[in-house]
Image: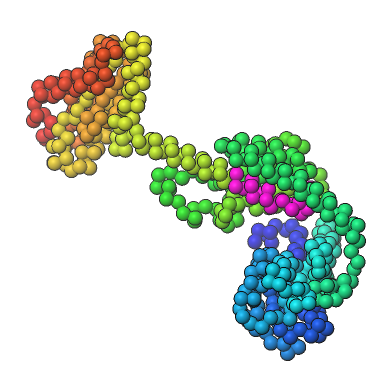
Amino acid sequence: MKTKNSGLPVTVLDFGKCPEFYNISIDNFNAMKRLVDHIITVHSSKVINYISGPLVNPEAADRYNAFLEVMTENSVTVDPDRIYFGEFRAIDGSNAVEEFISSGKERPDAIICANDAMALAAVEKLSSFGYKVPDDIIVTGFDNTYNARHHFPALTTVSRPLEDAGYKACEVLIDLINGNKPEKNTVFDAAPVFSESCGCAAEEIIDINKYRSDMYKTVNICKTDISLINRITTELAENETSDSNIRTIAKFINEIKCDRFAICLCHNWNKIFTGAESGISEETFQTHGYTEKMSAPLILEKGLNTPVKTFSSADMQPAPLSGGGNVSYFLPLHFRERCLGYYIFTNTKFPTKSLLCHTLILNISNSIENISKLLHLNSMIVELNRLYVIDPLCGIYNRNGFIRAADELFRSCQERQQKLLISFIDMDGLKNINDNYGHKEGDFSLQRLASVINECCRENKICARFGGDEFIIIGSDACEEDISTIENEFSIKLSNINSIIKKPYTIEASIGTIVTEVDREKTLFNLITQADELMYEKKKRKRTSHYLRHD
């Protein structure tokens, strides 16, 4: 890990796997033991279900192992069907109760939950089935969150000294900076809070007036944030470019009290896939971590945006913060499994206090993904348009492209009363080349002929492969002298290309050119037919044996 080798002092919370770091932890294990023991010994619960967090999480593992140990110590059976493994999300508590009830097993005396979010959701789900807490089933949580304390019934849970742990982490860093050597590991005790959801009286009395005041402030802030979300959602939906999207985001972020807000994007967030890449898969996208180089199109500070085109993701911050004592929150910017980058909120309570922070960043993430899709779609439209009008073998206009471009020249000559030049060119001896040297050589000869024709098209002229071995040149603002000029130039360049490629055959072609007035009675294809007929007369006068060179 780069962090280990950087020489920088690092403190971590509840992560003892890396002894190089200074770990500040809270004793989850013993606190959970005390809580489960209370449910068994004080409330005589014998049938107990458990809703766990993910065991890859060390806190979830400690709480689960404590539950198992107390159950064993008290000779209470641990039924695997009464254990539900979730992800610490509220929905897990609801799903677990659904599974427990539908199992057909005996109703549990208690449900122990590994955190408050799952516990509160479990209480609500039990209520929907007609069960009362704690009269019918005891429910406990872990963390002693604000919602757990103010719920009815108030949740029996575990209080963890999170603020003390955070404060201690800062103290350890300061000690290290000052040259001291603090303890590598600091462990804080956690304590059970026995309350209404297990049938105990609440240990602390809630100040109802303060609660009402707090709830009013919360609801009022929520209303303000909802207004912000609604307005930014509406305006973001109208954006079609990255620049306009960033301006809209900046406009609304200014309403949030924040010293600095930044959007940092992986360098490939707007990668355009073309050609063979069009069959993209999920593996094509950034799904883990961040690209080595990133950009920050928005660094909003004091109402001004100072974007950074490129910075190293190892630096995390796209530009240094001024002063000290800054607190930054880094939040992921993603669309489904695709990692687009991250947000940085600096010196603001918005990420931790607003109920709608998650909604806001999801809306912004979706808008950035929409811009990415628009860029990709526009690129595909350009590519499809190119394929529609360009001959893939010769790299010049095909008949579709010719008709589009020639119509403009034709109308321009009509409106300006200019003469139109049309050269019709037919390759001589392509069949002989294909028969004697193969179709690969035939394609090569067509490409070389097309390059000669293209070189003859300068100002006011376009060319196209009209079909098979037929080509056409059309030009505006022409005069009679242009006939000999273009045919002589074509002859010289064709002779030069034969000298360069030194093939056992000669690339030859017949050309017929007209310069004519363009009146209202003439159509473009009438004039093309005239040039074609002139070319054909010249071709008939050639000796067919001249098509191949004999050594």
For residue 482, side relative to residue 249 (left or right): left
Comparing 437 with 206, the one in front is 206
- The vertical placement of 130 against 280, above or below, is below
Comparing 497 with 48, the one in front is 48
Q: Residue at x 69, y 38 (%)?
A: 250
Comparing 447 with 476, the one in front is 476
Picture quadrant of residue 8: bottom right
Res. 44 in view: yes
Q: Residue at x 33, y 13 (%)?
A: 414
Q: Residue 195, percent across and down?
A: 84, 73
Q: Residue 354, percent across and down?
A: 76, 51
Q: Residue at x 82, y 59 (%)?
A: 170
Q: Residue at x 36, y 37 (%)?
A: 387
- The vertical placement of 58 against 314, above or below, is below
Residue range of the region highlighted in magenta in the rendering: 347-367
The verdict on residue 532 being magenta is no
Comparing 515 with 494, the one in front is 515
For residue 438, side relative to residue 413 (left or right): left
Res. 423 in view: no
Q: Residue 72, percent across and down?
A: 72, 87
The scheme the figure's colours follow is rainbow
Q: Which quadrant of the figure contains the N terminus? A: bottom right
In terms of secondary structure, what is the magenta stretch mainly? helix
- The vertical placement of 355 against 95, above or below, is above
